[in-house]
Image (cartoon, grey):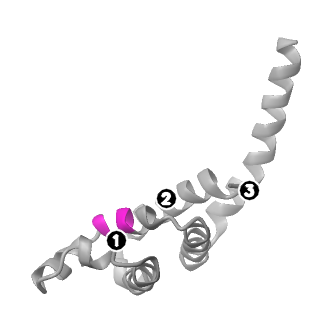
């Protein structure tokens, strides 16, 4: 019985490996769009807020008299702001960090 369970785990691992490799080959924009689409479908405003909390964009909002709470007024507004903030050209050397976060998020939530 234990061997059967291990065989199922191995098959699951094999099935997950190929898509993960494919994610590594995707462009930044493709990863961002896929992660955003999953988060939007899941109504996961926390994902967008978490992303924004790791950028200098939040400092800019605070400088303009805003706050993270103001940004998160609605899911639609948050997604719109995130799409503007997370263009590849605006991230510079932070892009690899966000690529990794998108891949992690996609792997965690792709089938849910």
Q: Position of residue 29 (x, y in %)?
A: 55, 79
- The residue segment tinted magenta is 49-53
Asked whether, in this view, residue 62 is left or right of residue 4, the answer is: left
Residue 106 shows in this picture: yes
* Residue occupying image coordinates x 56% and y 72%: 40
SS at mark 1 in the image: helix
The numbered dot on residue 93 is 1
* Residue occupying image coordinates x 54% and y 68%: 43
The numbered dot on residue 68 is none
Q: Residues within 10 Å of mark 2 (few under 14, many from 20)?
A: some
Q: Are marks 3 and 1 in contact (CB under 8 Å)?
A: no
Q: Quadrant of residue 38?
A: bottom right
Q: Position of residue 6 (x, y in %)?
A: 80, 22
Q: Is residue 52 magenta?
A: yes
Asked whether, in this view, residue 85 is left or right of residue 22, the answer is: left
N-term-proximal mark, 3 vs 1: 3
């Amino acid at each position: 019985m234990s061997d059967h369970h291990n065989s199922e785990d191995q098959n699951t691992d094999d099935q997950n490996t190929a898509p993960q490799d494919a994610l590594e080959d995707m462009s930044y924009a493709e990863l961002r769009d896929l992660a955003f689409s999953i988060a939007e479908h899941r109504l996961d405003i926390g994902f967008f807020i978490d992303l924004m909390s790791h950028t200098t964009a939040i400092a800019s909002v605070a400088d303009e008299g805003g706050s993270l709470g103001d940004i998160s007024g609605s899911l639609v507004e948050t997604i719109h702001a995130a799409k503007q903030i997370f263009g590849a050209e605006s991230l510079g050397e932070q892009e690899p960090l966000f690529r990794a976060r998108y891949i992690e998020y996609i792997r965690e939530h792709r089938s849910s």
